[in-house]
Amino acid sequence: MAQHQPLSIAESVPFGVSALAEDYGADVRGTCRGADDLPSLERQARESLKGSDVIVVTGGASVGERDFAKAMFAPSGLELLFAKVAIKPGKPVWLGMAEGKWVIGLPGNPTSAMVTARLFLAPLLALLHGRQADEVLQWKLHLLGTALPASGDRLTFMRANETAGRITPICNQDSGAQAALRLARFLIRRDARETELAAGEQVQVLAF
């Protein structure tokens, strides 16, 4: 009987989010991994709050019984500003404060993490550096290179690239697609229940 090698999945989220944070002015103090054990995660939360102004947590942001991303900060007095956002990808993103420090929770899937980091972490860092959030959320109108179907019931951000001066979505929009993510240079904003768009029409685009 053939022996199958165990599936190996590269850990990319901490590197991508750290690089994005540095691009927007953060001094990244380091990253760490935590086991699915609430007491040890609570200790990590207390340590992280001692030396940072902003703590970014990735993964564990859904509703399972072992999703401890918020629970680990509860003993530190976590107060949530919001716990979910009606967007795709990235619905589980959350933001709060604990011991006077900002804590932001990003989804664990690579694409969801990077999209929500661009939309929420980048403007937060801008504000903390005395800038306006609009400075890093400059949506511009561009022409579509291909038709787009009607959108669903959530505000959607499609990863895209530029081809011949027009914006074209990348083929794989799956939230776990790492190889496709590296091709994306823009986010296309689609409002909820937006009608079909034809090639040549204008869309709102953000540098990604």
Image (spheres, grey):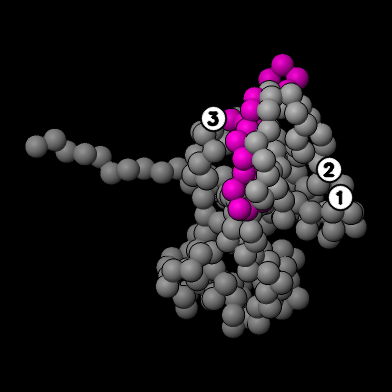
> Where are the magenta residues, as a range?
146-170
Residue found at the far left of this picture = 1
Is the residue marked by circle 2 packed among few (<14), some (14-19), or many (20+) residues within 10 Å? few
Amino acid type for the residue under numbered disc 3: Cys
Amino acid type for the residue under numbered disc 2: Gln
Q: Residue at x 45, y 42 (%)?
A: 10
Is the residue marked by circle 1 packed among few (<14), some (14-19), or many (20+) residues within 10 Å? few
Q: Residue 124 at what x, y percent from top left?
A: 78, 58
Residue 58 in view of the camera: no
Secondary-structure class at tag 2: loop
Residue 151 in view of the camera: yes
Q: What residue would you read off at disc 1?
A: 134
Q: Residue at x 74, y 24 (%)?
A: 200
Front tag of 1 and 3: 3
Q: Would you say residue 151 sits in the magenta stretch?
A: yes
Secondary-structure class at tag 3: loop
Is the residue marked by circle 3 packed among few (<14), some (14-19), or many (20+) residues within 10 Å? few
Instruction: Report the Cα–Cα distance between label 1 and label 2.
Output: 6 Å
- Specify whether 72 is left or right of 2: right
Q: Quadrant of residue 132?
A: bottom right
Name the one closer to the observer, 135 or 4: 135
Q: What residue would you read off at disc 3?
A: 171
Amino acid type for the residue under numbered disc 1: Asp
Q: Residue at x 67, y 74 (%)?
A: 80
Q: Would you say residue 145 sits in the magenta stretch?
A: no
Q: Residue 107 at what x, y percent from top left?
A: 56, 56
